[in-house]
Image: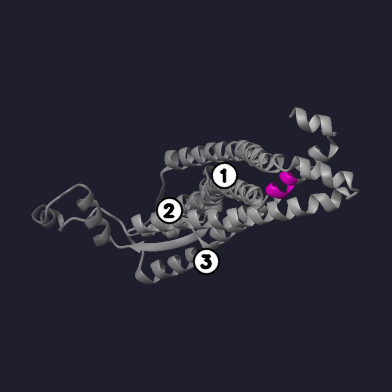
Amino acid sequence: MGKKKKNAGGRHGLQVVTLCISTTMVLVLLGMVVFTILTAHSLSTYFKENLTLSVWLRDNVTQQERTATFNQLRKCPYVHQITYISKEQAQKENYAEMGMSESEEEAFLDGNPYPESFEIRLKADYANSDSVLLIKEQLLANPKVSEVFYQENLMDQMNANLCKISLVLLVLAVLLTVVSFSLISNSVRLSIYARRFIIHTMKLVGASWSFIRWPFLKRAVGVGIVAALLANILLGAGIYALYIVDARIMDIITWVELTITGVSVLLFGIIITALCAYLAVNKFLRMSAGELYKI
């Protein structure tokens, strides 16, 4: 008799471990989707704020006028960062892009066709064609400004691609949520299936449905919490591996995204396992003894 109880306990323990592992894998996938959606917004902001406007100044602008213009532009609501580019710096940067040697550069030092300029990095909310056109008109209205340049095609293409990526991620999140619920539901149902006759016996002796249901819900929530913690550890290890490969990834990933992802995984683990256990136990509670033998 003791041996049978020991075997039954071993099988039950194995079922719990299997349920925990399968739930962990599903929560890792859900966590990856949540993390990707959150970082997609940060990545979009990062790319948009790295788009620049080149504001060329007129040749007759004095140092005092240049400083005043710089301070004026820095206070504009659409400016994320502004950098002054001198004539000499502009010349060297362009010669470097063309691959010219030092001797070739020296041959051109007498004549510098490049003007002084400001490079303006826009805030993400203003990095779209309509806003940039208005900003360009406003900048050109300044008598100290001669020209304003920006990569219009790149900006439009980037915004279009970001919209497509966001839509794909949203669809993927919905589909994966449905699939995840189905997988966890099947795992929970299988773990409860082995104890369906215990449920029926408790029902026969007069136990209420809530009394029968409570131990299964408590065990399912416990499995969900453990699985969520394991999933968060795996996700954290993956993010740390990305950081080791390229530390610049932290320019995109913030503690806000990491916290929301971790909390979301924990809530998914608790809610989905508890809901699946609730539905599975109710299913067996509604069945008669004959129906339990047939399934």
The residue that label 3 is drawn on is 75
Query: Which residue is nearer to you in this view: 257 or 32?
Result: 32
Q: Is residue 275 magenta?
A: yes
Task: Residue 186 in the image: state x and y as whole percent.
Answer: 66, 37
Query: Which residue is farthest bottom?
Result: 64
State if disc 1 and disc 3 touch (CB < 8 Å).
no
User: What is the crowding at mark 2: few (fewer than 14 residues within 10 Å), some, or many (at least 20)?
Assistant: some
Query: Which residue is farthest front?
Result: 1
Q: Nearer the viewer, mark 3 or mark 2?
A: 2
The residue that label 1 is drawn on is 22
Task: Residue 100 in the image: state x and y as whole percent.
Answer: 15, 50
Residue at point 48%, 63% (across, down) = 73
Q: Earlier in the sequence, mark 3 or mark 1?
A: 1
Q: CA distance from mark 2 to mark 1?
A: 41 Å
State if disc 2 and disc 3 touch (CB < 8 Å).
no
Which residues make up the magenta segment?
A: 272-277
Query: Which residue is nearer to you in this view: 31 or 277?
Result: 277
Chief secondary structure of the magenta span? helix
Q: Earlier in the sequence, mark 3 or mark 2?
A: 2
Task: Residue 180 in the image: state x and y as whole percent.
Answer: 62, 40
Q: Is residue 62 magenta?
A: no
Residue at point 43%, 53% (across, down) = 50
Q: Quadrant of the C terminus?
A: top right
Q: Three-letter amino acid code at disc 2?
A: Asn
Q: Nearer the viewer, mark 2 or mark 1?
A: 1
Q: Tag 1's secondary structure?
A: helix
Q: Three-letter amino acid code at disc 3?
A: Lys
Q: Nearer the viewer, mark 3 or mark 1?
A: 1
Task: Residue 215 in the image: state x and y as whole percent.
Answer: 76, 54
Residue 50: mark = 2
